[in-house]
Image: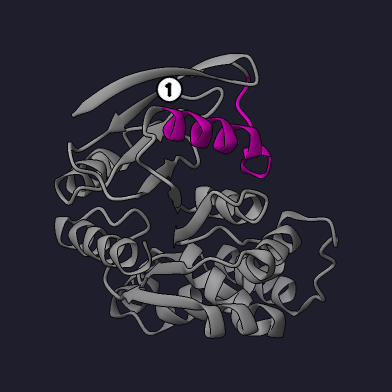
Amino acid sequence: MESAISFKINQHATLGILHRPESALPTAVLVVVGGPQYRVGSHRQFVQLSRFLANQNIVSFRFDVRGMGDAAGAKQPFEQLDEDIKAATDCLLAQCPEVSKVVIWGLCDAASAALLYAHHDSRISGLVLLNPWLRNDQAMAKTMVKFYYLQRLLSKAFWQKLFSGKVNIGGSLKEAKGMVSSSLQKDQQNTQSYQQGMLVGAQLFNGPVCLILSGNDLTAREFSEQTKAEKKWQSVVKQKWQEHKLPEADHTFSANTHKQQVELITLKFITTYQ
C-alpha cells in the first residue's frame, strides 16, 4: 500500500510516500534524497527500491527535503538536513507504530547527510550508504590524476585524437599540471568541515553500516582514496562497516542489473540486522 503523507519540516510543508505492507517487519527504511533530486530518484530508483522492499514486508518512506519537489522552504545544503531527516523519521514512526527501528538509505551527499545525523538519533539502527560524498580539492585532484589522466594516456582513442590534431595539447597540459599541483598540496581542511563531521559521525554511530561503492564513479573513488589515506577513517570502515563494490556500476546504479544488486544487498542488510 502506497500513501502520500503530508508533514512539516520546521513549519514548511512537504510530501512523502509511505510504502506499508500489511505484515511489516519492525525495521523500516527512510530514503533520504541528495543533490538536485526529489522523492522519485534518478531513473525512478527510489520508487523501485521502495516497491521491492514492500514486497519483502519492509516499510519504507521517501520524501522531499526542503526546497525540492513538492516541499516548501529554501533548498538546504546536505550539511544542514538534520531537521529534514528528523521530521521524516518522526512522521514515519507516527504512521507505523509497528516499526521500532529505522535504517537510513542515502546516495551521494544524502549518504553524507545520513552520517552527519545518525549518531544524534537513537531510533536510527543502521545505515546504507551509496557512494558517499567526501570531496575536497586535494582528494579530487588526486583522483583525477590517478583514474582519469592515466586512463587517457592508456587509451587508444586518445592517441588517435592526438596524432590527428584533435587534442588541444597546450590546454590539456595546463589542466593536468594544475591537477598534479593540487594533488601535491597539503590539505588545509577546516576541522569544522563536513568531512570532519562525517568522520565524527562514523566514529560515534554504533549501529551497522552497509557501504556500497560503484566502480565506474569518481565520487566513489574519491571516498575510497580519502578513507584509505586517513587512519581514523580506515579504523572505522575496515573494522565496523560491511563493504560491497559493484565494479561496473555508475554513480546512480542506472543499469537494471546494478539496481537489482543494490536492492538485494539492502534487503540482506536489513533482514540480517533487524
Q: How many marks?
A: 1
Q: Is residue 182 left or right of residue 6?
A: right
Q: Is residue 37 visible?
A: no
151 w.r.t. 1: above or below? below
Q: Amino acid at mark 1?
A: Gly
Measured as percent of width and height from the top left, residue 242 is found at 43, 77
Q: Is residue 178 left or right of residue 254?
A: right
Q: Is residue 106 visible?
A: yes
201 w.r.t. 123: above or below? below
Measured as percent of width and height from the top left, residue 79 is found at 67, 44
Which element is circle 1 on? loop
Magenta range is: 74-94
Measured as percent of width and height from the top left, residue 27 is found at 36, 51
- Is residue 82 part of the magenta span, yes or no? yes
Which residue corresponds to mark 1?
A: 69
Front in this rendered view, residue 241 or 188:
241
Residue shown at the point (72%, 54%) measured from the top left: 194
Q: Give the main secondary structure of the magenta stretch.
A: helix
Q: Where the N terminus falls, by quadrant?
A: top left
Front in this rendered view, residue 144 or 79:
79
Q: Quadrant of residue 198?
A: bottom right
Front in this rendered view, residue 135 or 67:
67
Residue shown at the point (50%, 40%) measured from the top left: 35
Measured as percent of width and height from the top left, residue 83 is found at 64, 33
Residue shown at the point (32%, 27%) measured from the top left: 17
Q: Using a 10 Å C-alpha cutoff, classify the residue at mark 1 as few (fewer than 14 neighbours), some (14 to 19) or many (20 or more).
A: some
184 w.r.t. 55: above or below? below
